[in-house]
Image (tube, grey):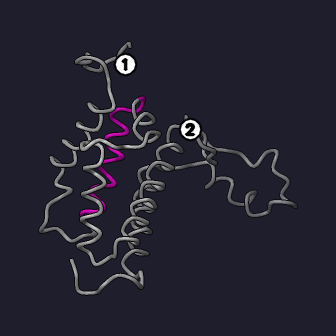
Amino acid sequence: MPTEPGAPPAEGPLTRGRIVAAAIDLIEREGADDPGAHWTDRVRAQARAFRQIAHGHPRSTMLVVSRQLHTTAGLLPVERALVTLRSAGFDGADAVRMVRVFIAFVVGSLLREVGVTPAFAPVQGGPATAGGVDAALSPEVSSLAGLLGQCDHEAEFEFGVELLLRAMEVHPGRRQGTR
């Protein structure tokens, strides 16, 4: 498989195991499991690490996210996310749901960034125009076309992470007083 221009040569075939090992290494280097950090900081770090790995290995991201992970290496990030949420006071069912919601958000954001899913902003940039939009049928789309035509993926990702964290913090099933 050819490498991208400027990319270091591959050290053998790219496998799911190598990708997951790289992800775990990055999460450990970035401190996503620092037990002294507040649980929201650990969740932020884990989400950012997943996104960073996906940006670093865009062609392999779909391989990882489209497969069920049954290996020890593949389950380690899930284990760490569950430990973080359980230590924050969530019961098992809520912790699993929250991991699934975060994975769906992160994967959906990444797919939008690379242009796989529908988005309002063009992948290559450039403002969208209201041309072709019937202002009588879609007055909001028409009036907000300028905003819909631009997207700062980093800012959108951080907005989504913070929104999810705020919802998690006020979830009625969370035991208060836990870190």
User: In the picture, which quadrant includes the C terminus?
Assistant: bottom left
Please tell me whether the stretch drawn in magenta is mainly helix, strand or loop.
Answer: helix
The image shows a total of numbered marks equal to 2
Q: Is residue 96 above or below residue 119?
A: below
Q: Is residue 114 left or right of residue 36?
A: right
The magenta segment: 42-59
| Quarter where residue 100 is shown | bottom left
| Residue depicted at x 28% and y 38% | 20
Check the image and name the residue furthest to the front. Answer: 70
Q: Residue 99 at x, y = what percent?
A: 39, 61
Q: Is residue 56 magenta?
A: yes
Of callouts 1 and 2, the N-terminal one = 1
Q: Residue 171 at x, y = what percent?
A: 41, 80
Q: Which residue is mark 1?
A: 4
Q: Residue 60 at x, y = what percent?
A: 39, 31
Q: Name the residue nearer the viewer: 11 or 110.
A: 11
SS assignment at label 1:
loop
SS assignment at label 2:
loop
Q: Residues within 10 Å of mark 1 (few under 14, many from 20)?
A: few
Q: Which mark identifies residue 115?
A: 2
Q: Residues within 10 Å of mark 2 (few under 14, many from 20)?
A: some
Q: Name the residue nearer the viewer: 118 or 128.
A: 118
Look at label 2 and name its amino acid. Answer: Gly
Cα–Cα span, label 1 and label 2: 19 Å
Look at label 1 and name its amino acid. Answer: Glu
| Residue depicted at x 34% and y 71% | 92
Q: Is residue 111 above or below residue 80?
A: above
Q: Is residue 111 left or right of residue 40?
A: right
Q: Is residue 110 above or below residue 10?
A: below
